[in-house]
Amino acid sequence: MRNAVSFTTSSDGTRIAWSRHGSGPPLVRVATWLTHLDYDWSSPLWSHWLTELGQRFTVIRYDDRGSGLSDRDPQAYGLDQWVADLEAVVSAAGLSSFTLLGMSQGGAVAVEYARRHPDQVTNLLLWGAYGRAAMERAVTDLEREEIELEWQMIKLGWGRADPIYRRVFTSSMIPEATEIQLRWFDELQRRSMSPEAALASARARSTVNVASSAREVSARTLVLHADGDRSVPFEEGRRLAGLIPDARFVSLRGRNHILLADEPAWPEFLGEVTDFAGGAAPKQPAPELTSRELEVLRLVAQGYSNEGVGSLLSLSTRTVERHLSNLYAKLSLVGKSARAAAAARLPELEDGHPRL
């Protein structure tokens, strides 16, 4: 599914790297900082986004100016520049109408683009987005000082081999990630942007406010937000949805700003996006579990502990753990949520398997 990277030139001469993959109706993902068109395919944080969305849509994505494979030393950062970059990518991709996906910082860019180009954006999708950035919503001196402290940490620690400074940003983005996922995102920060670019981009993003533009958006709009998002407050998502005429707001359970593959909110997000934007949900056969694995999973779904399952099935706890590890591997589930995610798929996995 992975495709070659192309380049286009924004209005100020900055070269923007972009790519296209998948099949189905076109979906353009607005760039955010901390992406890398090549590196993201091997990511434990982004690969499921690329694969799953590509099975439903023709996905157009690009690296932000100063980030990934785009030019690392652009002349300026700001809302007008980010919208111009998106305009250049849409033109290079030859799109006349499409679904626009704005995540996190890209949400404000998506809102502004939808206001300026109502004839192109048929559906507007916003995930973990805000209409007003951190400095715009800060009301106390302490809040402003905290933002300035984050800038200082970027300046001092972004490029260091030791990720101690970068881990602050990582922990706010994905508080429920495994250590492997945390280390990967730590490294992505260092690999995708220089300290100078990260600081310039962060300062520019902190003053963005598209509240007035949001009121003029005419595209069908779906706003989704995790109720425990530690990076962008839940209330900011609700506020943005309230500004856009007739926008639908969906709350998902979770604390991660970047949805992980094994958390229950991820399939809910995919279902909402697919239903809203008209993508075709892929039909994939359920993996084959052994009869014993299904027996174990049925009891897990009923709330039994590993020890309890072992007692009922006359198995050692270690054998129960081995069966669970095998079925997690078959279902491509990892992390703390694997047990709950596997239990949630029991009806699908039982189809065609008689009870013993």
Image (cartoon, rainbow, N blue to C red):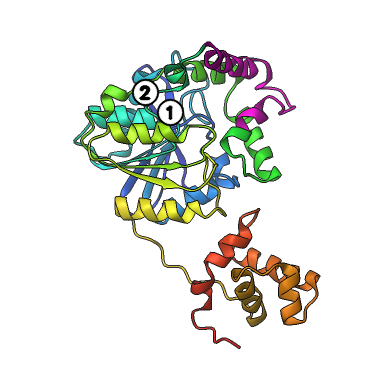
Tag 2 residue: 10
Residue 230: image quadrant is top right
Q: Which of the pair 167/77 is nearer the observer?
A: 167
Specify whether residue 30 is in view. Answer: no
Amino acid carrying label 1: it is: Ile
- Which residue does the image show at 38% across and 61% down from the upper left? 281
Image height of 65 relative to 355, above or below: above
Task: Left or right? Give the position of 189 relative to 122.
Answer: right
Q: Position of residue 35 (x, y in %)?
A: 52, 34
Element on which disc 1 rests: strand
Q: Position of residue 10 (x, y in %)?
A: 36, 23
Image height of 212 relative to 265, above or below: above
Q: Which of the pair 200/6 is nearer the observer?
A: 200
Q: How many marks?
A: 2
Q: Which residues are magenta?
A: 141-170
Tag 1 residue: 16
